[in-house]
Amino acid sequence: MLNTSISTLKGVGKVRQNALHNVGIDTLGDLLAYYPRAYEDRTKFYTLDDFPEDTAICFRATVGTSVKTTIIRKGMTIAKCKVFDEYDTVDITFFNRRFLEKQLFVGKEYIFYGKITSFRGKYHMQNPEFEAVGKSKISGKILPIYPLTEGITRNFLINSMALTLAQIKEIPDYMPESIVKSCGFTSLDTAIKNVHFPSSPELLQKAVNRLCFNELITYSSALAQFKSSIRAQNAPKMKVISLNPFLENLPFELTNAQKKTINDIFEDMYSGYSMNRLVQGDVGSGKTVVAAAAAYLSALNGYQTAVIAPTEILASQHYKNFTKMFSGMNVRIALLVGSTAKKEKEAIKSALANGEIDLVIGTHALLEDNVVFKNPALFVVDEQHRFGVAQRSKLSKKGQGCHTLVMSATPIPRTLTLIIYGELDVSIIDELPPGRQKIDTFFVNTGYDKRLYAFINKLISEGSQAYVVCPLALESEESDLASAEEYASFLQREIFPQLSVAMLHGKLKAKEKQAIMERFKNKEIDILVSTTVVEVGVDVPNATLMVVRNAERFGLSQLHQLRGRVGRGSEKSYCILVSDTSNSDTKERLNIMTKTSDGFKIAQEDLRLRGPGDFFGMAQHGLPKYNSIVNHADMRTVECAKAVSEKIIADDPELKKPENQWLYKKVHQLRNKLGDTKLN
Ligand code: ADP
Ligand code: MG
């Protein structure tokens, strides 16, 4: 029944079938697995003396004046009426709605749904939905909001879900009852029905937990299996070397955490089995030198290393750093990025194929099929959460039979590491190089802007530079969030005409971005207004101020990353989070930033306040994109999935036992969907 083609459903012709296929829906089962992305809660009713502004709400009101329709121009009508409850009245305007006078009658009571705005002391409403009291079909319910694409409307989806559920009656559960019960989850049938048409907020949460569990247990079992399989893969066995010449070349002593991490890596690379290691370390903890030590080992053994960064800015910064660290040593280094001139690219490629380059640094340009290595041994991936699944899959193909070192500055709470980075061994650099100063962090609202501008002026007059981060790149009509483009030109024109203000965002060409960063580094730019493109690894020690506009729009971990852009030199640094939020949870979140600078603590708080969804999003692991349901998993569900899958895989690594066939099938499907040898 679940495998029945979607074309058998009423209202699905060729065109709709195609549209549905494009979002992965071919069968009735696929349709039911197309979960809502949000819900409209029409269970709560408000009265006109107390209701939230800027939110669509339900309220009961009586029509006070008969509907008057006027034609304002050809094909354009306006209909108006007044409604009231025991506290107040609302003026309602409908555009282009016909026959309203036959639907809304004076003296009768209706349930209205929509946003109420207040203007000149009066309440107004446009195009509300309404139902007569006593005849309501949707008021009092929680309604699903689906992700929509061309050719698929909300009504179509709601009707089709209802039709399908009526046809199927009871959805069989593929998971053994013992597992479902052991974690206290609901049956699949109850879960699917309630995820589309929740009978109560409580049942909706239960449905979400169960469906998340379905996804997570498959994913974490696949990872657990994968982890044991890659352990056994061969990779170049390195001869033991002395790291001293490399260490003597450094302008600093390694921290103990760096030493320990390098030890972990060398042990892996001496073993003859492939290394799959994640180095997690807060911004500025010094991961680059750790990667360089690994590259040194590889080069001295006569092998090649590739270092892959998510942006050209970062790749060329690494190139400079590595060149410095390897100066005077016999290690041949090259930089290969998208914007490298064609001729040079060809030369580098042939040198790589001939083994004339020991260390190549670049972006995903390195992952193209025509980049061939003579004798590769080590792949280093920096800021790996920035890479998409497809790029990671390419990477793992290139890295077949090699050692892989993954570096991430995004601390993940310990409880989540296994499920997010399940197949990787983890080294943590939990110590900053000595002499780092605390970055003073403040949380203010826009009322503080005047003083903020004065502060910026003062710092810059003392020879410093500032970052300003905005949530949007370009101005948008749908949003009043600060955009980098708009805010940069505002600052330049209105506030700092005497200073040099520039703008940086992801929509610029790589060359332009590069040029702007160069100018910022050379102090030709005083204030750099940007989007989160500066979040990743950029190093300009002279910048001592990070301002974040609409700070409420960023996750704590992201704010922590942004803050890590300053405090890199000897001068005192500051971070100012600007937000006009009135939401008390958001305020609490932003206040955490002012109190701690420990990335792991911040991640833990983020987890406590926002749930694990953001971390899953960040890790961009193999879970299907459209299936955002897993973003709403709660921690208990994550822990259950982890515990149950570990137990099953430990007992039956290949999932051969009859009672595990359901899981074998799911894991198999997941692998097929990802088309990956590696799941990472
Ligand atoms: P991240 O971990 O964020 O990638 P980097 O590797 O960019 O950090 O290092 C940040 C800065 O700290 C660099 O300027 C680097 O040279 C410096 N650094 C790294 N390790 C040490 C150390 N042990 N002592 C002093 N400075 C260090
Ligand atoms: Mg780094």
Image: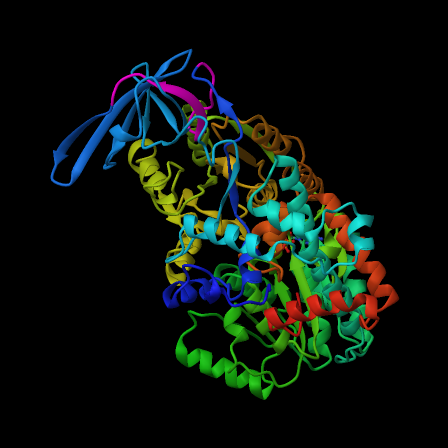
Towards the viewer: 40 or 14: 14
Scheme by which the image is coloured: rainbow
Q: Residue furthest bottom?
A: 354
Provide residue 449's location: percent of width, then percent of height.
42, 26
Query: In the figure, is residue 356 to the left or right of 234?
Result: left
Towards the viewer: 270 or 539: 270
Whether residue 107 appears in magenta in the rendering, the answer is no
Provide residue 68's location: percent of width, then percent of height.
20, 24
Provide residue 55's location: percent of width, then percent of height.
44, 30
Query: In the figure, is residue 46 to the left or right of 202?
Result: left
Q: Which residues are magenta?
A: 49-66
Residue 490 sits above or below residue 207 on the image = above
Towards the viewer: 470 or 82: 82
Residue 207 in view here: yes
Residue 153 sits above or below residue 312 on the image = above
Provide residue 221's location: percent of width, then percent of height.
75, 63
Image-quarter location of ligand 2: bottom right
Query: In the figure, is residue 71 to the left or right of 107?
Result: left
Q: Residue furthest right?
A: 651
Residue 396 sits above or below residue 162 on the image = below
Q: Give the number of callouts.
A: 0
- In the picture, the quarter occupied by the N terminus is bottom right
- In the picture, the quarter occupied by the C terminus is bottom right
Main SS category, magenta section: loop
Residue 612 in view here: no
Q: Quadrant of residue 228?
A: bottom right
Whether residue 61 appears in magenta in the rendering, the answer is yes
Q: Residue furthest top?
A: 87
Q: Quadrant of residue 117?
A: top left
Towards the viewer: 572 or 474: 474
